[in-house]
Structures are given as C-alpha cells and as structure tokens.
Image: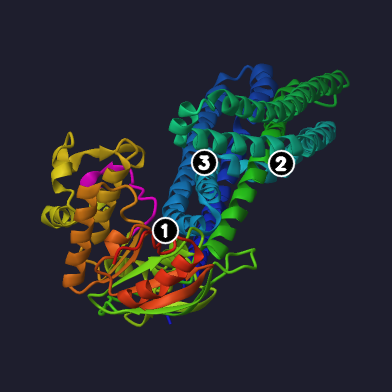
Amino acid sequence: MAEPTAAQGQATYRAAMREMVLGAGAAAFVGFFVNLLHLALPLYNAQVYDRVIGSGNLDTLVALTVLVVILLVFGAVLDVLRSRIFAILAARLAGRLGRPVFEAAVETSLRGGSAAAGDVMRDLSDLKGFVAGGAIALPIDLTFSPVLIGVLFLLNPIYGLIGCVGALILAATGVATEVLARRPAARATAATGRTQAETATAIRSAEVIAAMGMLPDIARRWHRTQAQALDSADRGQATARTLSAVARLLRTGIQIAVICAGTTLVVEQEATVGTIIAAMAIMSRLLLPFEHLIDGWRQWVDASAAHGRIQSLLRDGGSPRSVVPAPVGSSTVVADRLTYVPAGQDTPLLRNVSFRIEAGELVGVVGPSGAGKSTLARLVVGLWAPSAGGVYLDGQSTFLHERSSFGAAVGYLPQEPLLLDGTVRENIARFRDAPMDAVIAAARQAGVHDLIGRMPKGYGTRLADGGGRLSGGQRQRIALARAVFGDPQLLVLDEPNSSLDAEGEAALVSAVETARQRGAAVLVIAQRMSILAKADRLIVLRDGAVAHYGPRAEVLAAIGPQRQAQRPGPVYALGGEVRP
C-alpha cells in the first residue's frame, strides 16, 4: 500500500519542525555567548572609571582595551553566525515545505476554493520571514535576562531590584498591548482579506463591470470595505503605538531610577561611579528584549497561527492519492455506481451513475443545466473523491491514482479552459520538458498550428493573465491542444465547442476522431449535438441520475418522442437540438 500524500506531507512537516528545533537550539547556544559578550563593554567601563582613572595606570587601560576589543569582535562574529543560522533555517523551511504545501493548497482549492489555499501559501512566506527576520530570537534573549539581573545584583542589590521591577513592568505592557490590540487586528485582517478578494474579482470582471456601468457601484462597495479595514487597522495601531510610547517612557524612567539610585549609593559610599555606568548599560540590554516583546509578541502570535494553518492544511488538505507511479496500460474506463455528495450538503449531485468506455469509443453526455454533467467530468478525471462507487481507468481508481502517471494518460478540457502564465509551447506541453515536434503534433491535431503561427512570437508567445488577451475560441483550441498532447489514453472534454466557430468545431471533431483511431477512450459533454454525431453511446443525465444510456440511435429514438410529448416544435436532447 502506497503511503498517502497527506501523511507524507505531515511527515515532511514534522521533519522540518525537528530541524527547526535543532537549529533554534544551536542558535540559542550561540546566542547565549552573544549576550554574554555584550557584558564586556559595561564591565570595561566600570573598570576604567574605578581602576584606571583612580590609579592613573595606563598599562592597565591598554590591557583592558585590547581584551574588550577582542571580546567585542568575537561577539560580532557570533552574532553574524546566529543570523546566518536563522537565514539557513528559513531557507530550509521554505525548501522542505514549499512543494508539499503548494500541492496541498492546490488539492484544497479543488474543495474549498482558491482563496483559502492562497492564504496558506502566504502563511508559509510569512513563517519564513518570521524565522529569517530574527523575531524568533526573542525568547533566546529573554532567557538570558536572569543572567543580566544576576550581574546587576552583584554590582548592588538595589540595581537588581530595579531591573526586576522594570522587566516586569515592560512585560506587563507587552501583554496589555496584545490583549487590547488583538480584536482590532483580527477585524482589520478579515476586512483586508475581503478588500483583496473584491479587488481580484473586479479585475477579473473588468469587461462586465465597464460594459454595464457597474463601476461606480462596485467602487462604492470596495470603498466601504476598505474604509472598514483602515478603521480597524487604525484602532489597533493606535493602541499599539500608545502602549509602545508608554513602554519607551517607562524604559527612560527606569534608566533615570538607576542613575538616581546609583548616585545615592555613591554619595553614601556604598558603590562606585563605575557601577553606575555599568548598571545603565546592563539595564539597557536587559530591558531591550522586553520592549521588543510589545512588537515581537504579535509576530509570535501570527507565526503560531500560520504554523497551525499550515499543519492543518497538510493534515486535511492532502489527498489520499498514491505516490507510487503506475503507468496506465489500457484505455478502458468503468464508472461503477458513481455517487457524489458535496461536503456540507445532503442532496447528491450524481446518483448511482454507471457506464463503460472501451478503447476507441466515444461516449457523449447530454442533459439540462445542473444535471451533473461537469461534476461527472471532474469525477472521471479524479479531481474529486466519489462519495460512493468509483471511476476506474485500467482497473485503477482515477481519484487514488498517482497523479504524474495518471496525468500522462489523460487529457482534460474543462468547461472554462484556463491557460497558465507562460508561453504557448509551455502550456501545450503541460510545462514539461517536451520536444518541439510533440508540441507541434498536438497543435496540428487540435487545428491550432496555423493560428499560433500568426501570433507575435509563435510558440514562444507569452500568455499573460491566463491567456486573457486571447478570444474564447483561441483559448479553447490551445487548451484542446494541451488536452491531446502526448496522445492520452483517456480524453475528457467538457463543452469543448462552446466558444468555437465552424472552423474550430471542424478541427475539434477531427481531433476527437484522431484520438479514437489511435485507441483513446473519449468522453464528451456537449450541448450542441454536432460533436456527438459519431458517438457510440449517449448518456442522458437528469437531476444527477442516468435517464437514458445506450447506443446513440436508441437513445435519440427514446428521448425524441418524450420531448415531443412535452411540447411541440423541434426535438431537443435536454438542451441540445437533436439531428441524428
């Protein structure tokens, strides 16, 4: 039994997290010495003020200076090393998780839409930035605080008490910032997501919006959503800025408290002037991570949420498909009592659908809108998991089949033929490293070779915005060439002639006939019956169930009288005019 890709993704994630923990441990070890060496300068200042100035011994000054310079250089090297560790960890994290997260995101988009998948891809980028940006080092710096407080106590217990109180006050300020800014930040994030979604939708629908004068109304709605996002963001940022200013004021007050306490101790001859200088520098170092905690806390909370979403995606988003390549040997397709019920719904889109397509056969699917035709196409090519029953190619489930070997044997033209950003050649070749003659052969079979030749750079023409500058018929014909590329053994076409003119439809019929002659099993969903003139069998779907199934002539003979009995006029095959 092949290991399911979901489990494989989780295993990869656990391995990445283990590597992250080990790397963070190494960074913490280096960070301990980085923080320890930061004590060199304060202690150097204390010694200069207390010993060199008092004794006038310049040899001692030279020795102390040489020692502190060596320690500071060593500390800088260790600091660079720690930053490098974090950069390597971030790159390794993205390298390990990039592909499984991307694949899980694509699988998730099949069920929950592209928005959720896109959010998780941004989560991976944010998590990488969090690790590389150094915010992950905040706990390491905080754990060194007891050492700094201990040094302050050694200088004088009063300094230590001030340090403890100051650290607690700034920590409390950081927690207050998180509590008070959390809800406005969450509302701002949600509103920003809605604004981005509305923007993307408006850009995709620019022609409709402009043609029907919808732009002012759409702009007003977008402006309201954006205003809500900005208002929520301003509230959260105002709270954070206020508390950040309070934290800076408190930090300044603590520094003043150190000076006052130190001066009092010097006057009473309980401490030296050097201890004031050292205590101020150490106190600054002690309070710095607590002040950063105000901003760093939010970064940690966001990173933790991103971690949870990525983990959930890899756990639930991955499909149980096989990962063991299994080349397809036969073109025979069998649908056995196929049923599909969408998640969260009770009504099935398909119910108990069974049929068989042998090598070289063409089976057509007709039916009214909403009958389940496109759902059937998606199930046949394994995009969705059947709720019951299954579809089998060469005896193997089309949903569970390993995708690379399955994809090499299948051509699919969806109802909306989207092209990917890339050249015409790359799109037809499915972005594989394929020889040019194979690409041209597919284009010729789809009757689009001459059309491509009239493009600015031929097969090298780059298709931006998913081919948005091409006509619907041009996109459909290039997508047909992509579907027949590599001589697939199963060809599934969903409304392949919806945007084609007479020339394009003739090329489509020729491409389908060529696929049949070389032994491919062909399933065509159509409203216009011309493409099904040579179909071996027809399936008539109604309300997700098979109303008729059999040889083309028998099905046409059966549904013709039924439709004539329902209303006078031409005979229709549930949405397409029937002309045997």
In 3D space, how far apart are the residues under numbered discs 2 and 3 (Cα atoms)?
26 Å
Label 3: few (<14), some (14–19) or many (≥20) C-alpha neighbours in 10 Å: some
Q: Nearer the viewer, mark 2 or mark 1?
A: 1
Q: Is residue 296 visible?
A: no
Within the image, what quadrant is residue 343 found in?
Answer: bottom right
Report if residue 537 lies within the magenta region: no
Name which residue type carries label 3.
Answer: Gly
Residue nearer the viewer, 553 or 332: 553
Residue beneath disc 3: 129
Instruction: Rate crowding at label 1 as few (under 14), some (14 to 19) or many (20 or more) other CA atoms within 10 Å.
Output: few
Q: Is residue 277 left or right of residue 383?
A: right
How far separated are the C-alphas under marks 1 and 3? 66 Å
Magenta range: 413-426
- Nearer-N-terminus badge (2/3): 3
- Which mark is first along the chain, 3 or 1? 3
Q: Which residue is mark 2?
A: 145
Disc 3 is placed on an element classified as helix
User: Which residue, given by chain and number where applicable, does mark 1 sit on?
Assistant: 569
Question: Residue 150's image quarter?
Answer: top right
Going by the numbered disc 1, the residue's amino acid type is Gly
Which is closer to the viewer, label 1 or label 3? 1
Element type at mark 2: helix
How many callouts does the rendering have? 3
User: Can residue 60 be seen from the camera position used here?
Assistant: yes
- The numbered mark, 2 or 1, whose residue comes first in the sequence reads 2
Instruction: Judge from the rendering whether residue 124 lies leftward or rightward of residue 277; answer left or right.
Output: left
Q: Is residue 259 left or right of residue 425?
A: right
Cα–Cα gap, marks 2 and 1: 88 Å
